[in-house]
Amino acid sequence: MNYKRYAYINTIGCQMNVYDSEKLADILKSHGFEMTREMDKADIVVCNTCSIRHKAEEKAFSFLGKFAKEKKKRPHLITVMAGCVAQQEGEKAFARVPHLDIVLGTQAISRFGRHLDAFKSGKRQIVDIEESDVIFEAMPDIPVSSGSDFDENKISRFITIMQGCDNYCTYCVVPYVRGRERSRSHAGIVDEITLLANSGIREITLLGQNVNSYGVKEEGISFPQLLEKVSAVEGIARIRFATSHPKDLSLELIHAIRDIDKVCNHLHLPVQSGSNKILKKMNRGYTRETYLQRINALKKACPGISLSTDIIVGFPSETLEDFNDTMELLKTVEFDSIFAFAYSDRSSAPAAKFLDQVEETEKKRRLNLLLELQDVYTDKKNKALVGNSIEVLVEGKSLKQHDGFIKASDKMKQMTGRSASNKIIHFPSENSAIGDLITIRIENAYPHSLWGYPLGVEKNEK
Ligand code: SAH
Ligand code: SF4
Ligand code: F3S
């Protein structure tokens, strides 16, 4: 009998989970499953989970909890919890989700196939939260799929270059759920990117919790040297990376952003707080002053660089004065965008035991004030680009229409893409294709997008 078996993956959390989900999909495909976007059709459901904040963790449990009824109807359905909550909970996951079949920790991705086989042979309630030194190079028998199963955008991919974290910020679960920091070999990374480039990928984002310490433990090449190697891969037009830790941001990296053409003129540099007292309690290893010095060095070396950051409000003992220091820092730096979060207590992280927790309603109030302030700068930064000509990497057709702009027609298609500074740009175009680099003259700026015309296309052209 020839029937198809389908797999559905729900990815919660950061870009590293997106990358891991791609690997899980590759393994599932090599085990005869086809990926589906329809949950009801699935014979196996994988939830790749995140435990960075309480809400993310709850999302995972509520998603997987839903399958209790479904499994009664369809006993053959396999349910898998992967990722950071799986690593954190281990065996305990079965207490909350009794119908779960496999708990796959963050360092067990490459062993997923083995567990699927064991399940097929009758083994039940499988848990693997073992640590492992090997990362993805250890899966040479699993072909890397060319297109992403999760993203419509077929030209851009994430690549994890290092795993784990040794920084132990006091609020953060990552060191406990992703293990010690370790870097992949540069040859393995370049090989994987070459494969992707050969299949049409034009943009890659290199991922690590602190890319500045890439290769340090292994005494290998430095991160800026890795950027050089990646930039030599033919077909790759743009290189992004995340995350840089302010304490380790080197002059060498600043120069790499300035000097390597393919490296985008954009840096995500999480500050977390503008108060020295709070930064110390967070164990971030830098002060407000050193952060600002590094920002100044970046702005000087890389004019027009776009900057983004992460901020936590309401960390234990954050006073209004501390919060105000963060607000002031936003005014000083003028970030292009921020990701801001209300502090969430994580029982495995030391800050859970800190005194003077801030009330939830007060955290929300501060978060809103911060986001409102940032809107001013996001808008200002976008408006400053009106009249400029910007190179855009075309990502696909745009569903957005805007009054006053050329409407999609037989001749003109509405397309969308991103600038090197990571801004979304919509434009009409006759012949641009996904993956093309095209120069757009910006006409209008909105909080979340820019609109313009390709050079040579006039506004009144229909
Ligand atoms: N390695 C990166 C970030 C990893 S987590 C770095 O060092 O910046 C992504 C973001 O989640 C963090 O930058 C932080 O802003 C936020 N975050 C982490 N733990 C949190 C917690 N307990 N509560 C609220 N936000 C948190
Ligand atoms: Fe978490 Fe800090 Fe490591 Fe980032 S650097 S992952 S915030 S412990
Ligand atoms: Fe979440 Fe794990 Fe990433 S906790 S943010 S999925 S490393």
Image (spheres, helix red, strand yellow):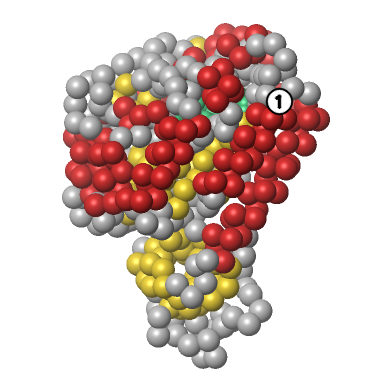
Considering every residue shown, the one lying at the far right of the view is: 361
Residue at (56%, 83%) from the top-left corner? 406
382 relative position to 297: left or right: right
Marker count (numbered): 1
Q: Residue at x 72, y 30 (%)?
A: 320
Q: Is residue 138 visible?
A: no
Q: Is residue 370 above or below residue 425?
A: above
Residue 55 drawn at (x, y percent): 68, 29
In this rendering, would 166 be left or right of 281? left
Which structural element holds mark 1? loop
Q: Which image quadrant is residue 43 in? A: top right
Of residues 404 and 343, the one drawn nearer to the viewer in this rendering: 343
Can residue 358 be seen from the camera position used here? Answer: yes
Amino acid type of the residue tagged 1 in the rendering? Thr
Question: Within the image, what quadrant is residue 352 found in?
Answer: top right
Question: On the picture, is 164 further left or further right than 218?
Answer: right
Q: Nearer the viewer, residue 149 or 366?
A: 366
Residue at figure coordinates x 30%, y 35% from the top left: 250
Callout 1 environment at 10 Å: few (<14), some (14 to 19), or many (20+)? Answer: some
Residue at x 57%, y 33% (from the top left corner): 274
Q: Note whether 151 is above or below 309 in the view shown.
A: below
Can you give x and y, in whole percent of width and height, for residue 111 in the image? 38, 20
Where is residue 374? Give x, y as percent: 63, 49
Give the labeled residue for mark 1: 319
**Would you place residue 424 above or below residue 221 in this image?**
below
Q: Is mark 1 within 8 Å of ligand 1?
A: no
Front-most of residues 49 and 276:
276
Quarter the C terminus occupies: bottom right
